[in-house]
Amino acid sequence: MNTLVFSLTLAVAAFGAGFLGSLTGLGGGFIITPLLTLVFGTEIRYAIGASLISIIATSSGAAAAYVKEGFTNLRVGMLLEIATVVGALVGASLTTVLPTRALIVLFGTVLLVSAYLTTRPHAEHLTAALPPDPLASRLRLDSEYPTAGGPVRYRVRHVPGGFALMWVAGVLSGLLGIGSGAVKVLAMDQVMYLPFKVSTATSNFMIGVTAAASAGIYLRHGYVDPGLAMPVMLGVLAGSLVGARLLFGARTDRLRLLFAVALVAVAVEMIYKGVAGGR
Amino acid sequence: MRAPWRNVKDADVQRAVGNLLRGGVLLAAAVVLAGGVVFLWRHGTALPDYRTFRGEPLDLRELGGIVRDAFSGTGRGLIQLGLLLLVATPVARVAFTAVAFAFERDRTYVLVALLVLSLLLKSLAG
């Protein structure tokens, strides 16, 4: 397979990954690294580099739409970015010293946990009637978001707990070149009681900044190969744009479940290969 | 103090941030695509090998080298420049929010945004 055929094949596969990632809300980054390592035989550090880059493209594209619709909580996002950026710097530095087999096993494990997190049913916390949380009020985090019945107010709670979990999300993002969207959403909707849609939108908003923190370290260590990143980034971006168009009005619950099951299979394969010593 | 639930100017900020993010991504994608065409035109028949990790050549690892390569018209240099533009997009967004919060006289969040910005710039500068 020469470079032209390799690039075109990879671009088509990346398009599929971006398409499914945005349609199911699980993100394309999770599929890129297994796709590159298991199917295209790429060394994991090149795969992580290309994946991280493609995440910046898709999350910024999605964030642009969410921000305009008013779902994103800019203050919560900015505040928690301190935690994710510091975490990402730690994670990306760890990547350069950890053995690749450890990275592969860790990737598989995080993939398993994320597949679980994104399919678990989520209960909304109705917080408008709660008394204000002193820290959240001081930081002016309480806000409102648009719904079919007009804007709905919500209050934010447990800021330190959310901050700590965001740091973990940042470490994982830097370590594995992923967006850590599932952990970010968990920190916001389960710990800080933000509405689910606000959590998803704010998570997308933060992913680009978190990834940009690791990108400098990845670039300096030579993880970002232009020949590999080019078809991946363009393919994933195009796929996610098309997926987002279809998302409105589509029922994605079953697709989401199917996709999560596929991710579990991929995760198990990665853990097995990592432990057995394959690539 | 402003009403806790809503900031009037936030809607304008949100629209501007959205446009900034979209513009940055589209510009980056266009440069990457141009670089990709050059790269495949010249090296399309070579055999790719990503099985073993060798790391990128030094000129593709830092800003000065990437810009030099891009302006001498190499495909790989152009792609890398596009990727740098992509990385710069969220960084520019943070800088923009710092300014927006300054206009709202929100000192806390100006500091928050500047802290995030300085961490990002420090990481990118090495």
Image: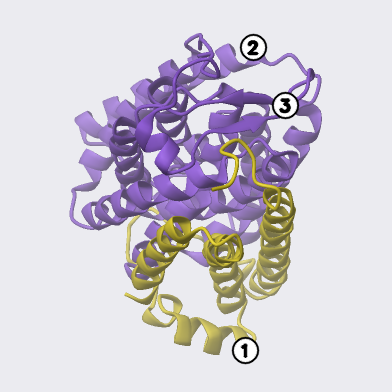
Does B2 sit left or right of A161 as displayed? right
> For mark 2, what is the residue?
A253
Q: Which of marks 1 and 3 is in front?
A: 3
Q: Distance between the residues labelled 2 and 3?
A: 25 Å
**Tag 2 secondary structure:** helix
Which three-letter amino acid code belongs to the residue tagged 3?
Pro
Q: Which of marks 2 and 1 is in front?
A: 2
x, y percent for residue B45:
62, 66
Which three-letter amino acid code belongs to the residue tagged 2?
Asp
Q: Among all residues in the image, which is located at the extreme front?
A: B1
x, y percent for residue A207:
50, 46
Chain A: what color?
Answer: purple
> For mark 1, what is the residue?
B71
Q: Nearer the viewer, residue A122 or A113?
A: A122
Image point (53%, 58%), residue name: A228
Q: Do labels 2 and 1 share a chain?
A: no
x, y percent for residue A61:
67, 48
Q: Dot 1, crowdedness within 10 Å: few (<14), some or many (≥20)?
A: few
Image point (48%, 54%), residue name: A209
Q: In this view, does A89 lie above or below A256?
A: below
x, y percent for residue B126:
32, 75
Does A56 sit left or right of B38 as displayed? left
> For mark 3, what is the residue?
A151
Q: Dot 2, crowdedness within 10 Å: few (<14), some or many (≥20)?
A: few
Q: How far apart are marks 1 and 3 (CA)?
A: 50 Å
Q: Is residue A39 visible?
A: no
Q: Nearer the viewer, residue A173 or B58?
A: A173
Chain B: what color?
Answer: yellow
